[in-house]
């Protein structure tokens, strides 16, 4: 099963196997993923050479800025009045200071295909469970129901995972020419895509069309005008097909259209989209009042409440503006936001530096997709979407060294 697995010694072999198991487990179970991370930490400590590995971390710019991003949250506690909420936010950021460096130091580039394949296998199993729910074989599986067939996580995160699966499968289908794999990837790609549009998750749907756009640019010559002609022909065509073939997608598009109309024409903010606009405007005001260092790691709810009571007292308040950029700016100002931006900048820069097509393209994809979806929610504060980013980043980054 692991005949070509690369490892240095017996402990390292066990560590690599646990990393592969983690890749399968984390999309399915929070407890299982965290338990495997604990064993990965123990095995990494037992493997030795700890000092040299830790000392090398600051030389890796992407990792350096991810750690500085966490440290900025620690420093932000100094001007935080609500320390209890600050600790909650800091806990959500722990992946950037511990889990991400741990996975980076544990993973090996030679085993990247094992990690990716195990992750895909987990998604295949998840999609299978989703179809069992959708077709009514079971009324409930874990968190999923017939009405909302996302068994292992909420639809908000589920479609993002499925879209990453679609992108990886489509990339393998387009760039790998093996006949057996072509048939398998084609079947899986169809099953994943249909599943995407039988489940809710607006950000995942947006990400799907962003993935189509990116795949066109990566497969064809992005320097030629005809590539962009193909993009503007086929992406709207896929949208038209999805709108007319998927009742779920059609309903989400119609709801979004109605929400935008109510907000801009009828000045009705009390809708899903309207509330997001209101949250964005109020959070921008919070940021502009504290532009350099923000309100502190834990004071966003209190500061937002004051602006909310002044501007939008008739609407529900929030502790999360559903926009990753705005929550970082409001909490940590330009000071913390600079580390956040540089983290993605060096990841993107590193992606362009490799000649390995798969890792170059998927590296750009991870950055591009997260930059898109973070406009609609704080996806690096949620467990599943954060751990996905933390899992994919070391695999990609290790292949650029």
Image (cartoon, rainbow, N blue to C red):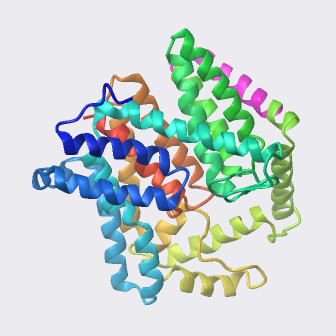
In x, y percent, where is residue 120? 53, 36
User: In the image, is residue 115 above or below residue 37?
Assistant: above
Horizontal placement of 87 versus 140: left or right?
left
User: In the image, is residue 345 above or below residue 117?
Assistant: below
Horizontal placement of 207 versus 94: left or right?
right
In x, y percent, where is residue 74? 33, 75
Query: Residue 9's quadrant in the figure?
Result: top left
In percent of the image, x 17 and y 36: which residue is there? Answer: 8
Horizontal placement of 204 versus 343: left or right?
right
Give the tally of numbered discs: 0
In percent of the image, x 61 and y 40: which residue is there? Answer: 125
Query: Looking at the image, which is closer to me, 201 or 77?
Result: 201
For this orientation, the residue located farthest to the bottom is 81
> Can residue 99 be seen in the rendering of this structure?
yes
> Can residue 349 be seen in the rendering of this structure?
no
Quadrant for the N terminus in the image: top left
User: In the image, is residue 175 above or below residue 319?
Assistant: above
In the image, residue 228 lies in the stretch drawn in magenta = yes
In x, y percent, where is residue 121? 53, 36
In x, y percent, where is residue 168? 53, 31
Which region of the structure is painted magenta? 222-240
Query: Looking at the image, which is closer to me, 203 or 43?
Result: 43
């Amino acid at each position: 099963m692991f005949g070509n697995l690369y490892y240095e010694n017996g402990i390292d072999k066990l560590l690599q196997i646990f990393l592969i198991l983690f890749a399968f487990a984390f999309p399915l179970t929070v407890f299982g993923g965290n338990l495997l991370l604990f064993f990965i930490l123990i095995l990494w400590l037992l493997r030795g050479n700890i000092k040299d590995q830790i000392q090398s971390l600051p030389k890796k710019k992407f990792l350096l800025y991810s750690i500085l991003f966490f440290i900025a949250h620690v420093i932000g506690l100094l001007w935080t009045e609500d320390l209890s909420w600050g600790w909650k936010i800091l806990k959500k950021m722990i992946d950037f200071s511990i889990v991400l460096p741990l996975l980076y130091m544990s993973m090996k580039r030679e085993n990247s295909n094992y990690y990716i394949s195990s992750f895909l296998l987990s998604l295949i199993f998840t999609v299978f469970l989703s179809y069992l729910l959708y077709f009514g074989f079971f009324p409930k599986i874990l968190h999923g129901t017939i009405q909302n067939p996302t068994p292992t996580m909420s639809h908000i995160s589920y479609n993002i995972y499925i879209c990453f699966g679609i992108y990886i499968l489509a990339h393998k289908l387009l760039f790998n020419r093996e006949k057996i794999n072509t048939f398998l990837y084609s079947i899986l790609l169809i099953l994943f895509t249909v599943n995407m549009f039988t489940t809710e998750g607006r950000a995942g749907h947006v990400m799907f069309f962003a993935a189509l756009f990116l795949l066109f640019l990566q497969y064809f010559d992005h320097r030629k005008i005809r590539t962009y002609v193909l993009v503007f022909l086929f992406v709207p065509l896929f949208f038209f097909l999805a709108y007319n073939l998927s009742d779920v997608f059609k309903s989400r598009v119609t709801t979004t259209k109605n929400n935008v109309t109510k907000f801009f024409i009828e000045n009705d903010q009390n809708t899903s989209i309207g509330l997001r606009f209101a949250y964005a405007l109020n959070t921008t005001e919070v940021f502009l009042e504290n532009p350099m260092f923000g309100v502190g790691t834990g004071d966003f709810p209190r500061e937002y409440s004051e602006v909310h009571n002044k501007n939008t007292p008739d609407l529900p308040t929030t502790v999360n503006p559903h926009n990753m950029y705005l929550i970082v700016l409001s909490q940590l100002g330009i000071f913390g936001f600079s580390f956040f931006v540089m983290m993605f900048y060096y990841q993107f820069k590193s992606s362009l530096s490799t000649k390995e097509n798969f890792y170059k393209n998927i590296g750009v994809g991870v950055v591009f997709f997260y930059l898109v979806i973070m406009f609609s929610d704080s996806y690096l504060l949620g467990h599943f979407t954060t751990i996905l980013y933390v899992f994919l980043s070391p695999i990609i980054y290790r292949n650029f060294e």
